[in-house]
Amino acid sequence: MIAAAIAPGRSLRWPRALLTAVLLALFAFAIFGPLANLLLWAFAEKWYFPSKLPSEFGFAFWQRVFDPRGNALASLGTSVWIAVLTVVVSLAVAIPAGYALARLKLPWRGAILLLFLLPQAVPNLPIYVNIARVFYEVGLNGTVIGVVLVHAAHGLVLAVWIASAAFAAVDASLDEAARNLGASPWTCFRTITLPLAAPGLMASAIFVFLESLDEFTGTYFVGVPDVTTLPLLMFNASMGGNYQIASITALLLLVPSIGFMLVVERFLKADVLAMVGR
Amino acid sequence: MTASAVAATDAATLASAALRRGRLAGLALIAPALAIVVAFFIVPLGISFATAFRAKDGSFTLAHFEKSFELYTTDLVFTLAIVLLSSALIALVAVAIAGYLTLGENPRAVAVLRWLYRWPLFIPFVVAGQVMRTFLAKNGMLNHVLIGAGLLDPLAAQSLLDWRGIVIAFVWKQAPFVTLLVAGAMASLDRQHIEAARNLGAPRWRVLWDIVLPQVRGTLLVGVVLSFVTMLSVLSVPLMINPNSPTMITVDVAYRINTHADYAVANALCLLSLLFAAGGAAFYLRHAVRSAGEAS
């Protein structure tokens, strides 16, 4: 009896495993197909319609991209420089703000938290359009400082939320114990709270760095015509029909993004994630 | 007055002074961050409103909105339709993947899926646009694979670089983000109810629909509404995949500014997309209030 009852289940198992495998393969194609197409274009020397694959592979376009006289390396430099400055500006104001939100008694705390949420919850186009207009009048359009300010205003919001969660996840009684033993508030912060919150702050720094590195719309409006970051270079190459240059630049942008995707959980622990927005 | 009462009043004064100092210190620490958000977010938003409603002579007018509707009604509808359809598909994909991650019984398949789904998580929109521009083209890899598999007649192959391309790019890029949130919420659920229902013979899709989904509805909604708002202000994807009319509002805004320096109509269009976003937020709040009412 029992064997008979189990047998149909057994016979069902193989088709089901096969179905799962087929569905997973389709899903893998949906994720990696587009990326594989990008790789093909990055290494295609010649690819004429309507052949399925490039007729020649090579590195000629890579040489063009990495040519010291070319503008790709300059754009990469600009992008990284802007992203570093954005991280510095964002964290310099987000660490104190996050600490105050997590540890100190603040008047209108809810309203302040809401204000720091708004830039994430509102379409950013009107912001960029009008900042560009104001910057144009004060001469900040097309300058690195102008782009950094736009990126920092956006990145800072993420940084404040993560920093506040990171400080909230640090046990406050450690701080009190040190204070009772006579340590000054600054010593407590420097030697206890800050080191313990460091992984969360590191995560927020990486987030801000990536956001700035990948940012397109703000730079499109504020950076023109003199500041060309990597995303803008990629966009211009793509619109100009130069798919090889566009794909190689896209690959350069993919490296940090995918790298962070693979390690994100090492930095953002569950205890910090649970404190976001508290 | 006894000595102890004096001491108590002194202590109270000291404590309130310390509290006031603490509040001042807190405000001082938070002031620079607030200043940046106000200067580079609130003020530009104010300028946007002022520009959209002001006529040349400075008086109040609705003319810019009339012109926006006259020129761009199709694009407004097109934008809303694309973003709504993408949001619905994102929710569907996220629930399907997160549901399998939670309820799947083949540990190997679950591990593979968990590794697979998050690749597009941090890929920028502008790169997603470029990737789809080649993948979905008439001569792109998708058509070649479909033809090679015998699923598509070579003569029937067509480019998907229109509204479908935008939707595919949006779902490809945003679904992993919502999946991450929803899968996290599902993982922290009490598994007792799930096990009980499974033991009573409920199929997995019933367990997902009737037991798991109602408990993670809030998280799903947050993810979908955030994606909805994000997609409303993406410029690169529609510019790269489908720049010709009908297209998305963001492309029209860039066009009004770059070609006509017409900030009035551009800002009117921006405010209309802000209105769409507010609709999304209201939808979320209504659900949040209702579920809070159910909980109490």
Image: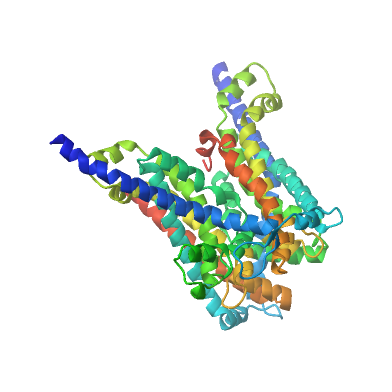
Q: Measuring 44% from the left and 60% from the top, which residue is drawn there?
A: B89
Quadrant containing the N terminus of chain A in the rendered view: top left
Q: Measuring 58% from the left and 82% from the top, which residue is drawn there?
A: B66
Q: How is the image coloured?
A: rainbow
Residue A102 placed where, x, y %?
58, 36
> Quarter-wise, where is residue B101 in the image?
top left
> Quarter-wise, where is residue B133 in the image?
bottom right
Residue A180 placed where, x, y %?
62, 18
Q: How many marks?
A: 0
Near-viewer residue (A153 or A106):
A153
Q: Measuring 62% from the left and 43% from the top, which residue is drawn there?
A: A260
Residue A207 placed where, x, y %?
64, 45
Q: As displayed, is residue A189 above or below residue A34?
A: above
Question: In the image, A131: left or right of B70?
Answer: right
* The residue positioned farthest toward the left in the image shown: A1
Question: In the image, B145: left or right of B292?
Answer: right
* The residue positioned farthest toward the bottom in the image shown: B70
> Could you tell me if residue B63 is visible in this image?
yes
* The residue positioned farthest toward the right in the image shown: A69
Q: As displayed, is residue B224 above or below residue B250?
A: above
Residue A158 placed where, x, y %?
61, 47
Near-viewer residue (B235 or A67):
A67
> Could you tell me if residue A101 is visible in this image?
no
Near-viewer residue (A185 or B199):
B199
Near-viewer residue (A271 or B194):
B194
* The residue positioned farthest toward the front in the image shown: A55
